[in-house]
Amino acid sequence: MTSNGHLIEIENVSKSFGSHLVLDGIDLAISTGEAVVIAGPSGSGKSTLLRCINGLETIDEGDIRFDGHSVPGAGKDVFRLRAEIGMVFQSFNLFAHKSVLQNITLGPIKVKGLSESDANGLARDLLERVGIPEKADDFPADLSGGQQQRVAIARALAMEPKLILFDEPTSALDPEMIREVLDVMRDLAHDGMTMIVVTHEMGFAREVCDRIAFVDEGRIVEEGEPKAFFEGAKSQRAKDFVDKILRH
Amino acid sequence: MSELWEVLVRHFPEFRSGFLVTLQLVAVSFAIAIGVGLFVGALRVAPVRWIRWLGGLYVEFFRNVPLLVLLSIAYLGLRRAGIPIGPWVAATASLGLYTAAYVAETVRSGVFAVGKGQIDAGLALGFTYGRVLSQIVIPQAVRSVIPPLGSLIIAMIKNSAIIGAVFALADDLLKEARLIGSATFQYNEVFFWAAIGYLLLTVSVTFAIRAIERRLVVRR
Amino acid sequence: MGYLFDPDNWRWLFSGNNFLFLLRGFWINVQIALVAMVLSLTIGLVLALLRVSTRRLVSKVAGLWVDVWRNLPLIFIILYLFLVMPESWRDAYERWVPGWFPTAFQTPFFLAAVIGLTLYNSAVIAEIMRAGIVSLERGQGEAAAAIGLRHWQAMRLVILPQGLRRMVPATVSQLITLNKDTTLVSIIGIQEVMRHARIVSATSGSPFVGTGVEAPLLQVFLAVGIMFVIVNLTLSRLSRRLELRERRRTGVQVEKVEGLEDQLALQTSLSDER
């Protein structure tokens, strides 16, 4: 833990794809136990910001520190940091050639050196926690989208991460499956898991998260508690965004 | 190093003529392949079952038979049977008919790639079937057919080398390289330049197709 | 047409051991194709891995190697090796070659044939494999990285097991091309089906070395062609079946080789550009 108590410190981060500036001087700090939603219109750079935090994308300027260690400065050792940061993807990305159980145990066995029986026990506990213990031996292709995403969450949890990143975890799901995934995420937040969630689910943002960061055109335009954000956004762009969503 | 240049300078006329012959072989064979391929491709998407079957028969035979067997049939077999077929005709017809089978498959998958939804949408607008074909299906099919056609040309360039390697059907780049090689015994140098010749052809087609494709990309 | 289907012109097929002799020649082609395929798959995999290496220089050099060999005519490569292969290599091969190898494999120029086929096909296969690896890297590779796996761990545990499985149908398709290409080694004097065909046609009509039944070249080559069509059609049906099975099992599109061998490679390199 760093002196000022933040688990994640994002400082003046900029990134461009070619001539297109996607992140334009982002500053954000998150403490252990916080659940932060990053909201904003599509193409505003939210997902890119998230992917920079575990080093899946490189940054051009600034620094990101996780637990006191610089992510861009980690070089080849970035995989050590990633082992402590879970990530849940929009398209689930379960390993198609491995069973549900093997998906969850791969990281603990290969990265943390757990024995197979310990890893299996852990995986079964986690499947219980996300509500699908009976699917342990199925393959990803046999599962519904909601079930796949819950396995992906279990896979992230199996590494006992200090932080989990959610990259639009419900955007690829049919409406009736969104609930089951959000419920799992809500429980995680209540249990004190530190999480950063990129999502369009404003109901989740309002009820579950501690803080919302509103991103537009690569900048954090507004940041605050959900209640304040939804009832009295200061900037015009955030107001328009909230209006559009509430009317929706 | 100087030997390498010397070989090129001294034998440039032969290299050039071989290169041009290869180019001509490919051009003529490609024209045959496109003509026959479009026809067979049309058979493959025809509404009548036995016509489709006929197209399929053509494709499966010419696609699965080695080009060298076709060349042998065309040049040795037909001649022995009393059909006086010239070396050029035998060569270009074999390469052309062989590649036509692939062209036909490319055309067929290009037409299928357009999708029934597009055809339905056209018909729903009140177009006739012919109009739907000419206004909607063909323009879209052309786009999806260009990259595979490009790789067919590349494959043709490479396959054309077989023509000069057997029966002395044509004095193409490979044949010229062998002739220069056997006269000078500088096989390494000679084949180096011949390789450059072939790479020049195959790689430039790759880039040309890339450029055309980039221009044709449907903006979404 | 009359000439083509005239039963008299086909009688050779059933006289003496003509048919068996052709079949034996064809079997040699199949054996050469299998040997070259095993070598090409092994070397192709190594090349593909070098190609996706995180070291820029390694990946560039491997890329150049692959691009050169797959863009040259196969017959060009075979002829070149045939013309320049040092005598010492041929001697070494003749000394090494085990006696139980098929006779066609024992000739000194067999080395040139196999090296040529392997140089070309390993480059083509490397390109197909690279495409498979790249297509998996985005989702599956990122998920593997996110749980803390290193590059090579992710490659070994996540990408390759899936990539190689998806490659199976494409490999079977490439085997068809390779099978056809084996006829080219007749040009450097290896006794396979094309040579056997010439021998059948030249000897069958003679009452002394043959049976006195004329075997016209046209019909003999047609018979050879039909052998290839039968085997290759079977292979392509198999490839199609494997592809459907794979798609049903994992729900993903498998790597495909449509038409000539380079189609897939070109298309994927084009889509990488975008």
Image (spheres, coloured by chain):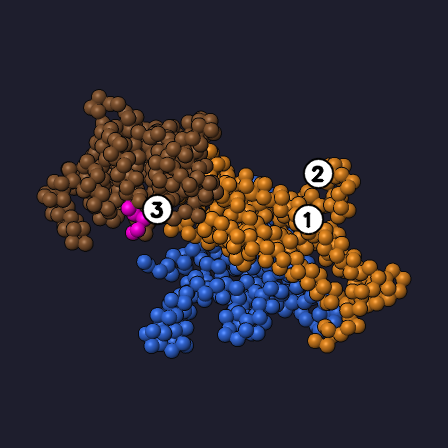
Chain colours: A brown, B blue, C orange
User: Compared to C239, does A196 lie above or below?
Assistant: above
Percent coordinates x, y for residue A37 in the rendering: 22, 40
Q: Secondary structure at mark 2?
A: helix
Q: Quadrant of the C terminus of chain A?
A: bottom left
For the residue pair C221 and A247, the one nearer the viewer reads as: A247
Name the residue carrying label 2: C89
Quarter of the image for residue A2 reads top left
Q: Secondary structure at mark 3?
A: helix
Percent coordinates x, y for residue A215 in the rendering: 20, 43
Quarter of the image for residue C218 reads bottom right
Check whether the beta carbons of the residues at disc 1 and disc 2 lie within 8 A of each other.
no
Q: Amino acid at mark 3?
A: Gly
Q: Amino acid at mark 2?
A: Trp
Residue under the image location 49 percent in, 49 percent down:
C249
Identify the subunit bearing mark 1. Answer: C
User: Compared to A71, does C121 lie above or below?
Assistant: below
For the residue pair A179 and B92, the one nearer the viewer reads as: A179
Name the residue carrying label 1: C32
Magenta stretch in the rendered image = A175-179
Magenta-drawn stretch contains C254: no
Q: Is residue C81 left or right of residue C13?
A: left
Dot 2: within a 10 Å radius of its alpha carbon, few (fewer than 14), some, or many (20 or more) residues?
Answer: some
Residue under the image location 76 percent in, 37 percent down:
C95
Name the residue carrying label 3: A146
Question: Is residue C204 something that shows in the picture?
Answer: yes
